[in-house]
Image (cartoon, helix red, strand yellow):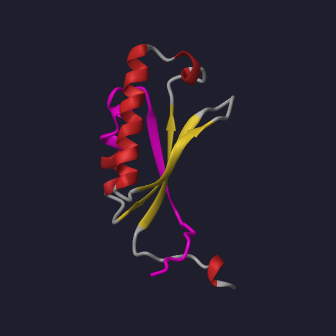
């Protein structure tokens, strides 16, 4: 197997987060208050991306089941519920988020 196909072991753990909005039409019909909260939600995850925690995040445009996805990298699993609990959309009750561990295949780091 080539180096490109090997699992990169950074010593960190990776999780997939799936955030579900309150209704399938949320993207099209959110209220001004919901839009403001979603702006804070995006800012929150952008900051986590800048900190190297969120590797990628964004909406999944599945018309029958729209949701958001994030792939995160953390030191330990205990960090994940805290990250979710501090998400402004979760605090406001307009998103529910579940998480699952994953075996991430990451690009090999070069120095």
Q: Is residue 104 magenta?
A: yes
Residue 67 rendering spot, x and y as whole percentages: 56, 36
Residue 71 rendering spot, x and y as whole percentages: 50, 54
Task: Report which quarter residue 85 is drawn in.
Answer: top left
User: At 40% across and 75% down in the image, what residue appears?
Assistant: 11
Query: Does residue 67 lie above or below 74 as drawn?
Result: above
Determine whether, in the image, residue 27 is placed left or right of residue 10. Answer: right
Determine whether, in the image, residue 99 is placed left or right of residue 2. Answer: left
Q: Along the line of sight, which residue is nearer the eye, 20 or 50?
A: 50
Determine whether, in the image, residue 108 is placed left or right of residue 75. Answer: right
Task: Report which quarter residue 34 is drawn in.
Answer: top left
Q: Quadrant of the N terminus?
A: bottom right
> Which residues, given as a range, are shown in magenta?
84-111
Residue 41 rendering spot, x and y as whole percentages: 39, 35
User: At 34% across and 26% down in the image, what residue appears?
Assistant: 92
Q: Is residue 3 magenta?
A: no
Residue 88 rendering spot, x and y as whole percentages: 33, 33
User: At 44% across and 34% down in the image, what residue appears?
Assistant: 96
Query: Does residue 83 lie above or below 5 as drawn?
Result: above
Q: Along the line of sight, which residue is nearer the eye, 80 or 37?
A: 37
Q: Quadrant of the C terminus?
A: bottom left
User: At 68% across and 84% down in the image, what residue appears?
Assistant: 2
Query: Does residue 34 lie above or below 86 as drawn?
Result: above
Q: Is residue 70 visible?
A: no
């Amino acid at each position: 197997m080539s180096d490109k196909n090997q699992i990169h072991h950074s010593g960190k753990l990776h999780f997939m987060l799936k955030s579900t909005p309150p209704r399938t039409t949320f993207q099209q019909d959110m209220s001004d208050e919901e839009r403001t909260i979603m702006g804070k939600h995006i800012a929150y995850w952008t900051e986590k991306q800048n900190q190297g925690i969120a590797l990628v995040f964004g909406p999944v445009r599945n018309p029958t089941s729209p949701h958001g996805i994030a792939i995160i990298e953390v030191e330990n699993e205990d960090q994940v519920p805290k990250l979710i609990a501090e998400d402004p959309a979760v605090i406001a009750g307009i998103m529910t988020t579940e998480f699952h561990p994953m075996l991430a295949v990451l690009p090999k780091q070069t120095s």
